[in-house]
C-alpha cells in the first residue's frame, strides 16, 4: 500500500509463528499478520512485530555504500527471545540479498528495464519521490 510519503507492506505469519491479535472490525481482522513494514521517505523503516518494533535508518555513505542502523524495542510483557533470533536472521538475509542485487546491477551485463508492477511498487514510489526532491 502506497502513501504520499511512504508505503506499507504486510508480513503474513507462517503456521506456528506469532501474529498480531487484531480486533474485530479492524481492516486486517482475520489475517495472520506477523509484521507491518512501514517505510517513510527518505530513509526510515518502522517494522512492527507482535513483540515490538525494529527501527531501521538507512544512511548513504557514498555512491556505492550504505549503512543501515538497527534499533530494537520490545513491548512490555511480550515474549521476545525466539522472535529476536528470527529478526536478526531476517535482517542478515535481507542484507545479503541487497548486496547480491547491487553486484548484479554493477555487472556489465545488466540492462535496466521496467519496474515489476506487482513486486516493485514501493521501489518505484521511492524513486519517484527521490526524483521529485532532487529536481526542486
Image: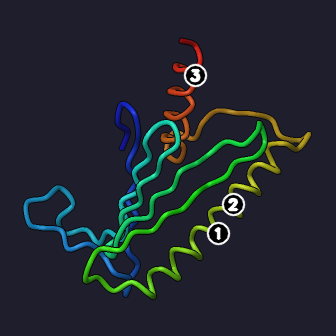
Badge 2 is on which residue?
Answer: 97
Q: CA distance from mark 3 to mark 1?
A: 29 Å
Using residue 47 as the reference point, say whether residue 56 is left or right of it: right
Relative to 56, residue 44 above or below: above
Structural crowding at the residue carrying mark 3, measured as other residues with C-alpha within 10 Å and reported as few (<14), some (14–19) or many (≥20): few
In the rendered structure, are the residues bearing label 3 and label 2 in contact, judged by CB atoms less than 8 Å apart? Answer: no
Structural crowding at the residue carrying mark 2, measured as other residues with C-alpha within 10 Å and reported as few (<14), some (14–19) or many (≥20): few
Q: Quadrant of residue 70?
A: bottom right
The image shows residue 63 at horizontal and vertical percentages of: 77, 36
Q: CA distance from mark 3 to mark 2?
A: 24 Å
The image shows residue 1 at horizontal and vertical percentages of: 36, 44
Badge 3 is on which residue?
Answer: 131
Q: Which structural element holds mark 3?
A: helix
Q: Quadrant of residue 52?
A: bottom left
Identity of the residue furthest to the top in this view = 136
Residue that appears at 18% across and 68% down: 22
Q: Nearer the viewer, residue 5 or 62?
A: 62
Badge 1 is on which residue?
Answer: 93
Q: Which structural element holds mark 1?
A: helix
Q: Earlier in the sequence, mark 3 or mark 1?
A: 1
In the rendered structure, are the residues bearing label 1 and label 2 in contact, judged by CB atoms less than 8 Å apart? Answer: yes
Q: CA distance from mark 1 to mark 2?
A: 6 Å
Q: Which structural element holds mark 2?
A: helix
Q: Nearer the viewer, residue 72 or 104?
A: 72
Amino acid at each position: 500500500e502506497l502513501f504520499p510519503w511512504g508505503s506499507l507492506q504486510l508480513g503474513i505469519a507462517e503456521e506456528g509463528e506469532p501474529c498480531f491479535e487484531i480486533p474485530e472490525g479492524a481492516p486486517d481482522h482475520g489475517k495472520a499478520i506477523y509484521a507491518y513494514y512501514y517505510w517513510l521517505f527518505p530513509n526510515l523503516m518502522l517494522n512492527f512485530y507482535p513483540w515490538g518494533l525494529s527501527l531501521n535508518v538507512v544512511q548513504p555513505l557514498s555512491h556505492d555504500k550504505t549503512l543501515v542502523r538497527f534499533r530494537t524495542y520490545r513491548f512490555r510483557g511480550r515474549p521476545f527471545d525466539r522472535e529476536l533470533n528470527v529478526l536478526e536472521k531476517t535482517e542478515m538475509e535481507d542484507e545479503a540479498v541487497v548486496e547480491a542485487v547491487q553486484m548484479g546491477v554493477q555487472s556489465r551485463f545488466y540492462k535496466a528495464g521496467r519496474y515489476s508492477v506487482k513486486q516493485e511498487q514501493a521501489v518505484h514510489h521511492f524513486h519517484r519521490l527521490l526524483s521529485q526532491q532532487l529536481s526542486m
